[in-house]
Image (tube, rainbow, N blue to C red):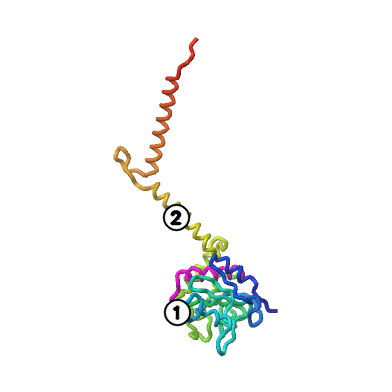
Amino acid sequence: MTQQVPWLAQAARMTDFPVVEVDGWRGRGHGGMDTLEGVVLHHTAGPATGDYPSLRVVRGGRPGLAGPLAQLGLARSGTIFVIAAGLSYHAGASAWAGFTGLNRRFLGVEAESTGRGDWTPAQLDAYPRLVAALLHYMRRPAGRAAAHREVARPPGRKIDPVGIDMPAFRARVAEMLADPTRRIPRLTEQKENTVADAQEIAEAVWNHPVRNTFGDVVQARQVLVAAEQRVADVQARLAALEQRLTPTDNP
């Protein structure tokens, strides 16, 4: 029994990158998937300009190969296009992790690139987040993320995605999958990193060496603690003096 993948848009939104649901995506595909076992990464080898100029081809196909050619697309801006919920012709003759014929078992992501490794910073951030989100929904490990060049048979048949170091990519995905709800979303991770940076700055200021009034080198926190103690001493002396100067009624 085959299946459509109804949660693609939900998984894509987990990344915090913009998501475009292409009209008709829920009913698009060459039938359903047999199972969901992983993700294959591709580049489009498309035009050098435009955010996602390859959408028409990925959605509708090309001469000799009917579309859809992938379930998802990744634009240069990091925007994620949800294209098809069903089987897509993206992997061809392929094998990975003990599976063959990956079109029926692995989702495909076509990321916009000329094929020369000209990835944008947004894509380099979004690509592992998207793949991690998809694997999270499948309940599959980082090892199920593979480049087209790794899975294509015979070996050497494909080169994409050029410029993506797959061992490093899988390590990044594994890091996200270790705590998916906190590490996959871009904004949550950035917020936590900002808080950590602020804490590090505060700690550095506290521990910064300074000279006290005696010329000794001490930590800034020690100077502040000593200053607070002196203020407390002065306040205590003023309170005692005020008490001595306050008139009292004598019988």
Classify 10 Å Cα crowding around label 2: few (below 14), some (14-19), many (20 and above): few
Is most of the magenta stretch helix, strand or loop?
A: helix
Q: In the current view of this chain or complex, which residue is farthest to the left?
A: 215
Q: Is residue 160 left or right of residue 226?
A: right
User: Residue 48: which numbered mark, if any?
Assistant: 1
- Foreground residue, 63 or 128? 63
Regarding residue 235, the answer to whether it shows in the image is yes
Q: Position of residue 29 (x, y in %)?
A: 63, 80
The residues colored magenta run 118-138
What kind of residue is marked 2? Asp
Q: Which mark is residue 142?
A: none
Taking depth in this image into account, of 94 and 243 the one nearest to the observer is: 243
Outermost residue toward the right in this view? 1
Instruction: Give percent across and percent down for residue 135.
Output: 58, 70
Q: Is residue 85 magenta?
A: no
What separation in Å lies between label 1 and label 2 (alpha carbons)? Answer: 37 Å
At a point 49% along the width and 71% down the height, the residue shown is 77
Q: Amino acid at mark 1?
A: Ala
Residue underneath mark 2? 197
Residue under the point 57% across and 71% down: 20
Q: Is residue 206 left or right of residue 213?
A: right
Residue 124 on the magenta span:
yes
Q: Quadrant of residue 241?
A: top left
Q: Residue furthest bottom?
A: 64
Looking at the image, which is closer to me, 78 or 188? 78
Q: In this orientation, does residue 100 appear?
A: no
Q: Position of residue 164 (x, y in %)?
A: 46, 75
